[in-house]
Image (spheres, grey):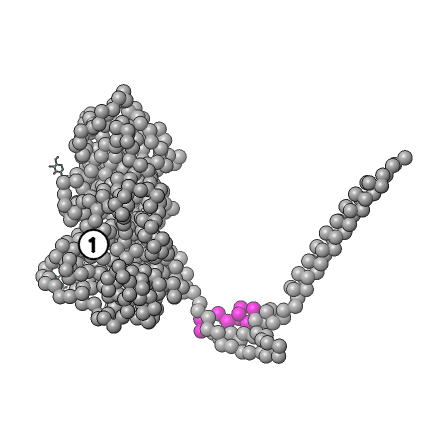
Amino acid sequence: MIQIGSRSIISWFILVTIVLYILYSSNHVLFQNEHRDCSPHLDAASTKQLHLTNTSSASIRHQEKQGPEEVTKVKNLKVRSPPPLLSKRQDTQLKHIVFGIAASSKLWETRKEYIKIWWKPNVTRGVVWLDGKVNTKSTEGLPQIRISGDTSNFKYTNPQGDRSALRISRIVTETFNLGMKDVRWFVMGDDDSVFVVNNVVRILSKYDHRHFYYVGSSSESHFQNIYFSYSMAYGGGGFAISYPLAKELAKIQDRCIQRYSGLYGSDDRIQACMAEIGVPLTKEPGFHQYDVHGNLLGLLGAHPVTPLATLHHLDVVEPIFPRMNRVQGLRHLMNSIKMDSASIMQQSICYDRSRHWSISVSWGYVVQVLKGVISPRELEMPSRTFLNWFKKADYNGYSFNTRPVSIYPCRKPFIFYLNKSQYDRASKQIVGTYTREKSRAPFCQWEMESPEKINSIIVLMKPDPFRWQKSPRRDCCRVLPSHRRSTMYIWVGNCRDGEVAEL
Ligand SMILES: *[C@@H]1O[C@H](CO)[C@@H](O)[C@H](O)[C@H]1NC(C)=O
Ligand SMILES: *[C@@H]1O[C@H](CO)[C@@H](O)[C@H](O)[C@H]1NC(C)=O
Ligand SMILES: CC(=O)N[C@H]1CO[C@H](CO)[C@@H](O)[C@@H]1O
């Protein structure tokens, strides 16, 4: 009684054909694999030999078939074995780092003040490389000064740039050639770069200095990065080259820079040589070129969760603290850095529940209080208090996200800059006092308490020496109860289990 129409017979036929085809082809594939697994006796033999040899200079008898005649060649291959693994983190210290500072004799009198801010006489090692003689006193606490080698025989054809780029790009090599002992890293910077040296140590100790490393960061300016390279470490922001890589660079650099006479600067010349060696940039966003103009508050108030390593272009941007000159402002910041360099500029975000305020702390620098609730994802974006490299307020030109400075008067942040900080032995906390930047608050209709009543904010923080040995995480902050209406107390530190920034 089963009726099979001619249509369904055709369908069945097609189905069976497909199944047969699939079976056939999969069998074919399986068979081929099996065949491949058995055939290369040669591979198996050489693998065996590889297993047997385990010393670095062992030569491996490597056989390979070549050409139609199948000539068997025996080659001696030198295999570089990796250095023995360290069970703990690398133990790089400040004494292993040598700084090479690019300076010019013309600007020396003003720029040396920036070096004095961070240089620790008899502790930091390094050399200032100048283009001519200057007068200095040994009591000034500056690094040793040397005059760069002559570069007049090198080609320089860039119409916009300056020949000094050649001299500056050779600083790593010239510093290497001094033959200093027990060096793991060479760190380059300009005379207007300020280093947080302990954070440079923290960053570099993550990497094995026995290998080739080129560590630094890009520009804030997307256009600069397009024009130069996203793969380039910007020189003023500072970059580090591991000892073996500096050794390799020293061998080739003079030949290498002749090949790139058309480039603009010193750092792009370094990157060109790095590309020839084949070493990519290891990006560390704590190195700051600061290719911007104006007020750094937006950037320094929302630093990425990474140690602050450098600040650059300090002559270009405004002083970082109001009513201070550039050097005074940086010295003032240095007081916080001395208290806890690991925490400098680390942001924490919390809310005042009863008054509905949003609070963003940039430790050791500034506290900002805003009316209403602004989410952490907004607050951790730098606000555009600065202009781009071409002095334009164009946010398309940055290589990271920013948020606008609000035009609404009620949204204006109340800014409290660091006044002083001290260590309290009893509670083992750093007590920082931040005072409000007195400017007339704009008229705001919100029926909400105004942070204008607060004159100072006391921030309590217990230093965490292991902060950067854990996975990166923003600190938490909490508003503490206060007796006085004009003072606000904030606690900053490791987050508790389950603690998040929410209102
Ligand atoms: C640095 O060391 C030298 C020689 O050891 C010493 O004469 C000088 O006073 C030291 N300077 C400082 C600032 O400690
Ligand atoms: C700290 O505050 C006191 C008192 O208001 C003031 O005299 C002093 O100049 C401030 N210091 C800084 C560095 O802002
Ligand atoms: C198989 C082989 O060569 N093993 C050697 C590996 O290296 C150790 C230490 O150098 C030797 O003791 C082994 O004989």
Q: Is residue 425 visible?
A: no
Of the 4 image quadrants, the one containing the C terminus is top left
Amino acid identity at mark 1 = Asp
What is the x, y in percent for residue 308? 28, 48
- Residue 72 position, x and y percent, is 58, 78
Residue 56 appears left or right of 63 = left
Nearest the eye: 118 or 471: 118
118 versus 417 height, above or below: below
Q: Secondary structure at mark 1?
A: loop
- Give how far across and how far down residue 334 sits, in percent: 19, 47
Q: Quadrant of residue 408?
A: top left
Asked if the magenta segment contains residue 63, the reply would be no
Name the residue at 31% across, 49% down: 221
The magenta span reads 47-57
- Left/right placement of residue 15 relative to residue 408 reads right
- Residue at mark 1: 192
Is residue 53 on the magenta stretch? yes
110 sits to left or right of 352? left
Q: Position of residue 23 (x, y in %)?
A: 74, 53
The relative height of residue 387 versus residue 450 in the rendered view (above or below) is below
**Quarter of the picture holding the N terminus:** top right
- Examine the rendered structure and indicate whether residue 412 appears above or below residue 224: above
The answer to which image quadrant residue 238 occupies is bottom left
Neighbourhood count class around disc 1 (C-alpha, 10 Å): few under 14, some 14–19, many 20 upward: many
